[in-house]
Image (cartoon, grey):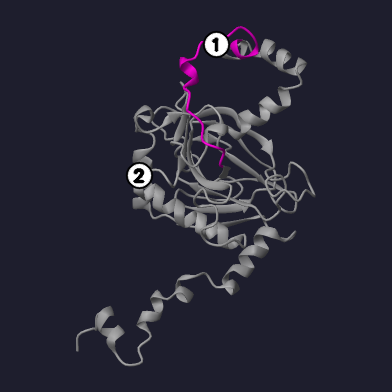
Amino acid sequence: MSPLSLTERQLLPGDAGLRRFSFEYLAIPDEDLAPLRRQLYHSSGAGYVIFPGFLDQDAVHHIQSIWPNIDPARTHKVFWSKLDMSAACSDFYTADIHGNRNFYNFLFNTPVDEVTWTASIFVHMLRNRLSGRPAFAETFPVSGRALSYRVVITRISKSWVKPHRDYMQDPGSLDRNKYDLSRLQATLFLSEKGRDYTGAGLRFERNDGRSVVFGSDVPVKAGDLVVWRYNNLHSIEEVEAAEGQLGFMRIIYPPEIMHPPRPYVDQSAVPVPPGPVARLKSGSKRVAKATLGGLGLLGLARQVLNRTRGG
């Protein structure tokens, strides 16, 4: 007797095949989420959960072949300010002479790569369920924030992202943009330490205060997804990639504040007036720091710089 197809089994009296496509079946049961949430939030937990092989190697190799090789000037606009992020904005990028790249992508725009786009939706849904939010919360710009799936390639950097905590600007505040202990971030690893880069990479402080580096203290491979507490101290430390190496490649998923739409201005085409900005652009870091410090803006400038980089 030949095996029955799915359709044939669905037609059998009393068969439960169709239940596989029900809302209840496709949703993640709370009993499965409970131990993961304990790992994330409890003081005895690690503060992170690893989903090994979230992407299979075919998908990993596909994504690796796309983002280091595209011409961003044809697909993105140069990133200048988060104030340009709105429900009507384009995708943005930054790049430097070392091959470091950031791609700020939004789900509401036509994707450069549909595999990256689709995987990011699934990551965001999982992250939302783990943090107790509706599956599609902040997916699109309807409630103040919208997901940015940020593809980051770090090749050469001494300190790409300084140690910091997110959603901890004003502890005790009722403003969830400034204080939210439920927030989770996710990192989809797309390269491996040793093979693709050397150095540290993502350093993270566990709930018990112990500091670990992913790829060294905590084994991770390309295709693994790590969901972690946004409030815990984290940083991107020294990374170096030799000629022919991919670098530290990953995708992170910040829900960005959506601002009122405004005309995009390519700042590189705007003449730079004399003053602090000109000094910054000219590379005189000492003079720029002194000037910003005198204006009381050095701390703010550092915060802005850190947030434009990929964690």
Work out whether residue 149 or residue 163 is closer to the camera in this orientation and state it: 149
Disc 1 is placed on an element classified as loop
Q: Hey, what amino acid is under mark 2?
A: Asp
Find the residue positioned furthest to the left: 1
Kindly identify the residue that appears in the image at 46 percent across and 22 percent down. Answer: 266
Of residues 84 and 179, which is closer to you in this image?
Answer: 84
Rendered location of residue 221, percent (x, y): 48, 49
Give the residue furthest to the top.
274
Q: In the drawing, does residue 68 fall left or right of residue 253?
A: left
| Residue 113, numbered label | 2
Q: Give the magenta range.
A: 258-278
Q: Nearer the viewer, mark 1 or mark 2?
A: 1
Dividing the image into 4 quarters, which one contains the C terminus?
A: top right
Q: Which residue is tagged 1?
A: 272
Mark 2 lies on a secondary structure that is loop
Residue at (73%, 44%) from the top-left corner?
168
Q: Residue furthest right?
A: 172
- Tell which circle, 1 or 2, labels the residue nearer the N-terminal end: 2
Q: Residues within 10 Å of mark 2 (few under 14, many from 20)?
A: few
Is 10 situated left or right of 90 in this image?
Answer: left
Residue 121 among those drawn in magenta: no
Residue 112 on image: x %, y %:
35, 41
The amino acid type found where label 1 is placed reads Val
- Marks 1 and 2 sit apart, C-alpha to C-alpha, by 35 Å
